Amino acid sequence: MTTTAPSRFSAVLAGAGIGGLLVLAPLIWAQVQNPWFLDRPGLWLLLAVLPAGCIGAVVGLVLARWLGRLPLAAGLLCWVIGWAASPAVGMLWPRPGQVDGLRLLVVGIDGATFDLIEPMQGRLPALEGLMERGVRADLQAAEPMFSPLLWTTMSTGKTPEQHGVHGFSVHSDACLAARFWEIMEDHGLRTGVYKWLVSYPPQQVSTFQVPAWLAPATETWPAELSFIKEIELSRRLKRKQVQATRGNVTLVLEGLRHGFRFGTIAAAVRFSFTEKLLGPDPERAHQQGQLIRVLMDRDLFVFLLHQHKPAVASFTDYATDAIGHRFWKYHQPDLFDGVPPAGVQRWGDSLDQAYLQADDVLAELLAALPADAAVVVVSDHGFQALQGEDSGLFFAPRTERLRALLEERIGEVEVAKLGHKVVVTPTGADPKLDRERLQTLLDGLIQASTGEPFYRWEPVTDDPRSLGLTLRDESVTRHRLESDTVNGEPLGEFVRLTEAYSGIHERDGIFLAAGPGIAQGVVLDPMSQLDLTPVLLNLVGLPAAQDMVGQAPPAMFTQPPALPEAPASYDALVRQRVLVGGQEGANEEALRALGYID
């Protein structure tokens, strides 16, 4: 047979090529629109090219009848176009490289601790590379170790008493001090902020701002990014509090337009099918959901970096914290009683997976940095085991009844728990009077079996309006839960036994910095979170304000940066905030998922 002879086989080839092209065309279009789409070539071949081949073969047989006979050259040409040229476009389409104009990247890894990073030496190349070519230090958190409070302290360089953020049910307008991105915006630097806590409602900044997990609604800046919050909230709240009601396909298409990758979508689909086939599994849903959310956040953030080209950008990964709370007992089973071996085998590497993923994301973000840019990596606190007894069960204070009693007697109050401790913060107009009433009320809550107050309270050193509560009698057992009372109410209204949460916040978080003018391979003395905003400002040539307590450690620089004269304060910028939307409350489902409230 010659290449010019008409052939029914040629018609089959042509049909297969046309059929394959029809099937692959939408995916090729996605790759052209979103250069990061094809991130998993092997998965592409398995889930796209092979199904397209089957469909193309069927189409080829059908078209063969219609086409009759074709020259072999024509058939081969159609087949090559359908099965060589089009996949080549998808697999070879260039991705953007470095982000022009990016001067400073701030990466948050919530709850990260050197106690976990150091034992994983050799497995975290991005973090280890920063330690070698930059500086590191323990970044010490203050009490109470509530993430919204800590992230706000880090972003303002002010204490909670100065910045005004004390609990969880707070919005960005509650922050009384200027954040580092507001200061930089005022000095003409374009900023992009991705999921920094207490950034809801978002601000109209020069590029983008996406609120973090406490946000109860879908507002973002610009509004077209609201799909990412809708995906997050619809999964957690079953759309009860989500204003938009777009379907899953529409949300995925929005994500695809904004950087979602083939591997990310495949992971989400695989998780959804697993849930349907194997039934619900809270631990699997928690772990996989956290990791998939980070993939979605990474995809969108990288897209936004290249689309908006900010001078300063921040990105925060919360999976390390969320998985630490729930899976620490599998990570260190020897510290706990009664941890099932099957659970250790199944979930023992969950924390490692979260850190490996965080390192992979960091490596990709570092690849987008120009040579003259600086990077800072921080966590808001460290992590450690929450140890308990009674066959692997841990007593956990309950907050719902206590909050109701306090609101009835003293008015507005924030009540949240950190492991075995409860932190209570009056939020009314007269904190001093409210705290006196709070102390009187707590002293009057008597436990029947002991005849003493149920709670022991103490002032919170770093937040004068708050009280830290612990149980006077921590011998909580099933029998006592069934028989004991507090002021005539069942003990179970105030405390419970749980095996869900085994990791707890610890003081020492992480600080890493690298870039031009930063020393290499230096271990700094422990830093305060109050030092972070001065560091970030200095790295872009701005001074810390005179009313900021912290300072950039001189030892982190090869030579002190040249800075203009320090202003008395930047806090006048607070009045210039332009916020987008907003509604009352916080995302209480997220707080329950992490064990902060009941």
Image (spheres, rainbow, N blue to C red):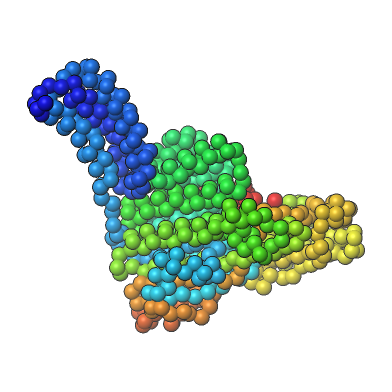
Q: Residue at x 29, y 38 (%)?
A: 29
Q: Residue at x 32, y 28 (%)?
A: 55
Q: Kindly indicate the quadrant of the structure image that contains residue 372.
A: bottom left
Report whether 340 appears left or right of 227: right
User: From where the camera sits, is residue 430 visible?
Assistant: no
Q: How many labels sit on residues?
A: 0
Report whether 378 appears left or right of 390: left
**Of 233 and 406, the residue lying toward us:** 233
Q: Residue at x 48, y 71 (%)?
A: 511
**Of 326 and 55, the residue lying toward us:** 55
| 21 shown above or below 470 | above
Q: Tell me where residue 62 appears, x and y as whole percent.
A: 27, 19
Q: Tell me where residue 590 appears, x and y as whole percent.
A: 60, 50
| 60 shown above or below 113 | above
Q: Tell me where residue 415 appears, x and y as whole percent.
A: 70, 57
Q: Kindly indicate the quadrant of the structure image that contains residue 147.
A: bottom right
Report whether 470 appears left or right of 171: right
| 323 shown above or below 25 | below
**Of 51 and 547, the residue lying toward us:** 51
Q: Quadrant of the N terminus?
A: top left
Q: Tell me where residue 313 appears, x and y as whole percent.
A: 40, 60
| 151 shown above or below 218 | below
- Residue sticking out furthest to the front: 1
Q: Residue at x 80, y 59 (%)?
A: 476
**Of 89 and 220, the residue lying toward us:** 89
User: From where the camera sits, is residue 447 visible?
Assistant: yes
